Amino acid sequence: MQTIKLKEKIGYGFGDMASSMFWKIFGMYLLFFYTDVFGITAAAAGTMFLIARLWDSFFDLFVGLVADRTKTRWGRYRPYLLWFAIPFAVMGAFTFFVPGFGEVGKLVYAYITFSLMMIVYSMINVPYASLLGVMSSDPKERNVLSSYRMSFAFIGSFITFMLLQPLINKYAGAFDSTALSVPGKISTSPIGWVMGVATIGAICSILFFICFLWTRERVEAVNETENEKASVKQDLKNLWHNAPWWILVGTGLAALLFNAVRDGVAIYYFRDYVKVLYEMPGTGWDMTTIYFLTGQAANLVGVIVAPAISAKYGKKRTYMIAIGIAGILSAIFFYIPNQIHWILLMQALISLCAGYVLPLLWSMFADIVDDQEVKTNRRASGLIFSSSSMSQKLGWAVGAFLTGWVLAMFNYNPELAKLGLEQSAQTIFGQRMMISLLPAVCCIIAFFGMMFYPLTDKRVKENAEELEQRRQNK
């Protein structure tokens, strides 16, 4: 088994760094953008997220099937990084553009641009995720690659939080004479948002190009001829009967829903409940940004130590312990005092646990690829890894839908925010519940779901050895 050099590990990490920079903008800022900048209701935005993401999530399976059947001199999956790097950035800017339409026209524009953005995201992210399964056949090496991927993803998120709000506020001040500048608050100027996101998008395109240049595809199916002739119907049938896949998609969906709800309500929670007007000198960061940065730093620590801990205690056990503790701490979060040091401390502890979970989740999908190949003699990396993107999008879709509708249910009124008036006590209670108790329920679901996951570390090792032996005997 070939050892992956450091440069290639970093190059692979750059791919998810780029994806994560936009993903965090979508997860933590997009609902706020639609309600307080773009001008549609929280319920309308939440419904749009659910509808657009539901069909787009299943579109990921189509992308996986196509990628598995792509054959170029660069490989099956790497070419997509090259082809869709620039469309990725362009559609991001269009998504955060505010047209001069009426209410209905704006909603139609939001549906179209958001849906197209998710299509482009699928076309680059599904092949990127599938790349993990063909860079190395060694389960331990994949675990390390997955850790690099998630480490750079959190670094990307960290950079987004460092740059986005200062960029938005600076562009608003430079190009919008009507923009109000309030220290400690993010601007609602449309030009500030589209220019800020466009700048982040340009960085993402460069990172995707580097990922394409620095990575290589090495692993082929044991029977490559049969692999190429396999029908879509047979691939889907194999996936339908893959019990570990179903379990991992379900638990992954719950874990990602946990993140989506916590992240989506954070801006509202800080502005309406915490209400600490602070801007760090020389940075432009308010307390919401500092809260996000604290979480990303703790996530990164969890990602870095996850391979060593999972190597000692096993992926399944480590996942269950981490998600269980995250659920307990999330429930406690509801009862802590409204004091910033308590809030930041709990954010760090919860995010540390979440940092353990995500690299294990993506590494397990690679294990499922091997397990299915042992059973069926068919290596469907793209299809199986597309499910990781599918569960990510479904988790975010349901999370954003819940966030938007629960805000509406608790009578959130963006007009009050624009006038500088307080939200009702009922609204603030809903925000507190969404950042604590609702994520705790998601953790409970993920914990019990993982109890039924059948791929032990012993079985994963046996599968890898079996496939390596088959390749040697070709």
Image (spheres, rainbow, N blue to C red):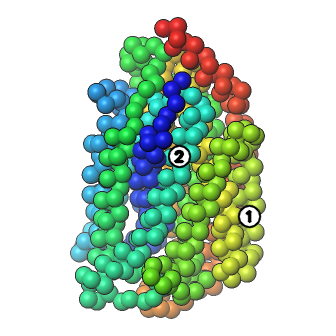
Given the image, on which type of amino acid does mark 1 rest? Answer: Leu
Side (left or right) of 147 relative to 225: right
In this rendering, is residue 30 above or below 305? below
456, 119: nearer the viewer:
456
Side (left or right) of 101 relative to 57: left
Q: Quadrant of the N terminus?
A: top right
Q: Is residue 339 visible?
A: yes
Given the image, on which type of amino acid does mark 2 rest? Answer: Tyr
The residue drawn where x is 36% and y is 30% is: 76
The residue drawn where x is 34% and y is 59% is: 203
The residue drawn where x is 45% and y is 64% is: 159
Indicate the position of residue 48 as horizontal and vertical percent values: 41, 60
The residue drawn where x is 33% and y is 70% is: 196
Task: Estimate the spatial distance between the alpha carbons at disc 2 and disc 1, rounded to whole Å.
Answer: 27 Å
User: In this figure, which residue is indicated by the disc labeled 1?
Assistant: 329
253, 344: nearer the viewer:
344
Q: Give neighbour class at mark 2: few <14, some 14-19, many 20+ (Cα, 10 Å).
A: many
Q: Give neighbour class at mark 1: few <14, some 14-19, many 20+ (Cα, 10 Å).
A: some
| Secondary structure of residue under mark 1 | helix
Residue at the front extreme?
6
- On residue 404, the disc is none
Q: How many numbered marks have been drawn onto this rendered protein structure?
A: 2
